[in-house]
Image: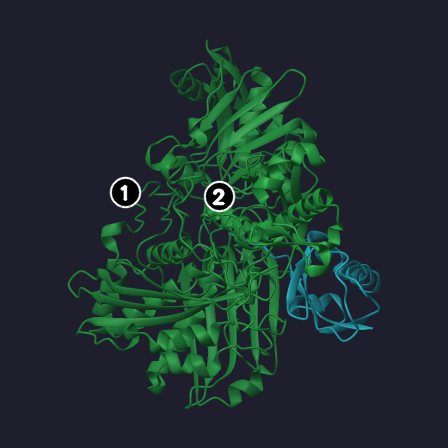
Amino acid sequence: MMALDQNGKRIFKVVGTRPPRPDGIDKVTGRALYGADVAAPGMLVGRILRSPHAHAEIVAIDTSAAVALEGVKAVVTGTDFAPQADPTLRDIQENCMARGKALYDGHAVAAVAATTAAIARAALKLIKVSYKPLPHVTDVDQAMRAEAPVVQAGRALESVPAGTPDNVTHRCEFGHGDLAAGFARADLIVTRSFTTAATHQGYIEPHACLASMTADGKGDLWCCTQGQFNVRTICAALLGIEASQLRVTASEIGGGFGGKTSVFIEPVALALARRAGRPVKIVMTRDEVFRATGPTVSTSIDVRIGVTKAGRITAGEAELRYSGGAFACPTVELGAQAAFAAYDLEAVRTIGWNVLTNRPKEAAFRAPGAPAAIYAVECVIDEACQRLGLDPLEVRLINAARKGTRSSYGPTFDDIGLLATLNAAKAHPHYRAPLAPGQGRGLSAGFWFNFGGNTCVSLNVNTDGTVGVTEGNPDIGGSRAAISQMAAEELGIPYDKVRTMIADTASLGYNDVTDGSRVTFAVGLATIKAAQDAIRKMCARAAKIWGIDPDAVEWVDGAAVPAGPNAGKFPPMTLAEIAALSFKTGGPIAGHHEFNADGAGVSFGVHLCDVEVDPETGATRVLRYTVFQDAGRAVHPSYVEGQMQGGAAQGIGWALNEEYIYGSDGRLQNPGFLDYRVPVASDLPMIETVILEIPNPGHPYGVRGVGETSIVPPLAAVSNAVSRAIGVRMNRLPMSPPRVLAAIDAKG
Amino acid sequence: MVTVTIWGSLRALTDGRATLEVEASTFKQLLDRLVRDYPGLRPQIERGVSLAVDGRIYREAWFTPIKPDSEVVLMPYMTGG
């Protein structure tokens, strides 16, 4: 039974506190085992040969000299993988190892396993690949033209109209209402076009794995991933083995942010291990991470909005052109749904296209698709506010989606937190703080869906009164602490009596990938249900000991107690006392829960950004940054704040510096952190955070996903700040110093 | 009967209709009837869809109950990062 305050709200004892992170000591002392830290006896070194061409036919591959080199134990190419009928698996496989064509600079074409790294590198040089270079295209708008080089033909879905250029794979459309009537009611119509660059998730730990395949077909794979079960599903299919024969263990993860939700090297390592009969370890170099794993989409977006003099948006429309690289990519569907989701609009329409380019296959990155779309919309709203002389925050309050709003993507919103988030920003000192000449303040709202998904949790009550929670999602943002807190809260025991571990794929039922801001919500919910399952069993044990009906026992503050005076008079039996007697009262006690979670609840954020632009260099300095986010119940507020700060930092980098730069030869020119410039601590002010705890009705504690929303608003918040600081509307990301300087110079 | 709102680009596969009337009381029944009545939707439904029922979004949850007066919106399959 939960304790309630006078208003009927639950009083939490553990949830909402800030215990030390359980992985902290291992990480700061270097004991944590990341993907590259795993080793096995007889292990070989795997290396991958990559295409130097942006687009080329692979005429022939001669591996004979490499195979003959002493110390080389296995060589594989694309033909060593069986063709896949399923389009998703086919694309993953062809991305891991090219078949017929190299589709981008860095595309894998062959791999070797050798006894040393030096021999493996020498072997790669002995592989002779005959390429026939083909024309390439890396720009999304150019790739949509009829005369563009065709990256892959025949990839269009049924939604793409006949006669559309071959590189177009997806078309989607969302919205409702009468656009013409809406624009007719407007006093001002603003139309603008924007581009955003592909950016990398920028995780510090490169992809790494160790694969082992025995002669009888049993496989083991250790890797850094956001989802070991998904890795198992994909690798088992690509290798043609049954799921039960492949055990995948997730290492500690040195950042993922969506980029480790797929596979790149894991099937290759397994294929090499199977051929060599020895374990094979592959660790990507930073160059490989940039050239051959998934950045986010590059985009080109047109937006038009109509606004009255009073600031009411009468209509909004957008056309979004996304490229997810050389393979079909549905991310534009998410962008097209999210673009106007923050607003209550009578007339709205978005049209999205995905276009193939000779770039690496897109991988997810926090709120995939939403940042670019919302950047374009929020910049146009800000321009309308400037032109009409309106306060940008008041205009957003006037138009904000709220309970009962029909969202731009279809469903009607229930309780949502955008208004509260905007009001918190309005009331914050940051919004009224004075600015000096050359400085500007930008504002943006943001939105993300969040979801739940397939989840399985076991909770074991140990005989010493401690509890172990076994869950199946790698901890990329503090989930082990949050899950332990929720288990402790539900069981009524101290936090330090609970330890949460992450299971391999042989030890627990299937869990979806750690993505969609789902883990604290869905795994937390499963943990609460598993705890309730264990509580039922502990109450039954107490009832047996007392000789009363199990229904006459309830759980209060970590102990079984008689449920009222008629149940009998017995002193409370604590969890530790029941656990200590468990072998005598029926055996071990465990709780379990598995489900496909729903009810995650959407999330909104509002960001305020102050910048100063150096008119001599075009360099932008972020002076002050505040994040306001509807986070639902903040289970561990420090982690929630960390998510809000981390997303903001990544979004600031996206806005100011980060981009994949391709030369005229179609090759990536900046595959390293020296030339691909992510913000570092000295680049940023302390990012302030304001958590709005608007409970999610879909979770018993009110928990809502928080990991992704924070990367959505920064692109426009920074862009609007820079635009106001220099007096020119910026419409291209990143706003690197040369581009800002050019805009200042063009203004005259 | 349940009224299902579909997203705009699917209208080309439903004779231009933006809302569809379907006899269904669960997510699975609804998908089956949509495929039966509008075969052009089959590829999209087989690739995966989400369903918003009274504002709550579900993925692959076949037995989610749907009431006749529920607001039902077909959506692309949700993913995240």
Q: Is residue A632 left or right of residue A540?
A: left
Q: Amino acid at mark 1?
A: Leu
| Residue drawn at x 76%, y 71% as measured from the top left | B15
Which residue is at the far left? A616
Amino acid under label 2? Asp
**Chain identity for the colour cyan used in the image:** B
Separation (CA) of disc 1 from disc 2: 28 Å
Q: Please provide percent x and percent y for residue A280.
A: 51, 21
Check disc 2 and report its element: helix, strand or loop.
Answer: loop
- Can residue A41 be seen from the camera position used here? yes
Q: How is the image coloured?
A: by chain
In this figure, which residue is indicated by the disc labeled 1?
A674
Q: Is residue A484 or residue A164 the one in the foreground?
A: A484
Task: Report which quarter residue A162 is drawn in.
Answer: bottom right
Check the rendered structure and report the hue given to chain A: green
Estimate the x, y position of residue A38 in percent, counting from the top left: 46, 25
Image coordinates for residue A288, horizontal then vertical, percent = 41, 35
Chain label for disc 1: A
Q: Quarter holding the C terminus of chain A?
A: bottom left
The answer to whether any part of residue A472 appears in the image is: no
Q: In this rendering, would A516 be left or right of A426?
A: right
Q: For the residue carrying disc 2, how many other residues have a C-alpha within 10 Å: few (<14), some (14-19), or many (20+)? A: many
Q: Height in image: A506 above or below A386?
A: above
Q: Does dot 1 land on a helix, a strand or a loop?
A: loop
Tell me residue A598's x, y (percent).
64, 58
Q: Residue furthest top?
A: A70
- Residue A660, compared with residue A467, is above or below; it is below
Location of residue A150 with respect to A729 vertically, above or below? above
Q: Quadrant of residue A557?
A: bottom right
Using the image, tell me which numbered label, if any, was put on residue A374.
none
